[in-house]
Image (cartoon, rainbow, N blue to C red):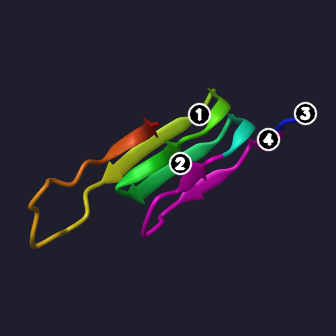
Amino acid sequence: MGYSRISNSSIHWGHGIALEVKESENIIFENNNVFRTLKFGLNIVTSKNITIDRNWVVLTIWRNLTAMTAGDPNGGIVMCG
């Protein structure tokens, strides 16, 4: 099986997550710039064989929520599951 590649790109000034990979496999994310996103830069959920190489993830900012009952995590690169 082959790989999908995201490379040499700039993702910036978003009003949400820059990139979310969910239930996927065989993805290469390399040599990219992710700048000023909301909550997460890269969010990887229940996926496998994901390669992250030579990327800049800068200025991931918090959401402005009025009710924070369980907290509101944020991060540059987040992996779960």
Magenta span includes 49: no
Q: CA distance from mark 1 to mark 2?
A: 8 Å
Picture disc at residue 34: 2
Q: CA distance from mark 4 to mark 1?
A: 13 Å
Magenta span includes 15: yes
Residue that carries the numbered disc 3 in the rendered image: 1
Closer-to-camera residue (24/62): 24
Which residue is situated farthest in the right direction here? 1
State the residue at coordinates (63%, 52%): 10
Q: CA distance from mark 3 to mark 2?
A: 28 Å
Residue 66 placement: quadrant:
bottom left
Residue that carries the numbered disc 4 in the rendered image: 5
Closer-to-camera residue (46/66): 46
Residue 27 at what x, y percent from top left? 73, 38
| Disc 1 residue type (three-letter) | Asn
Residue 21 at what x, y percent from top left? 60, 49
Name the mark nearer the viewer: 3 or 1. 3
Residue that carries the numbered disc 1 in the rendered image: 55
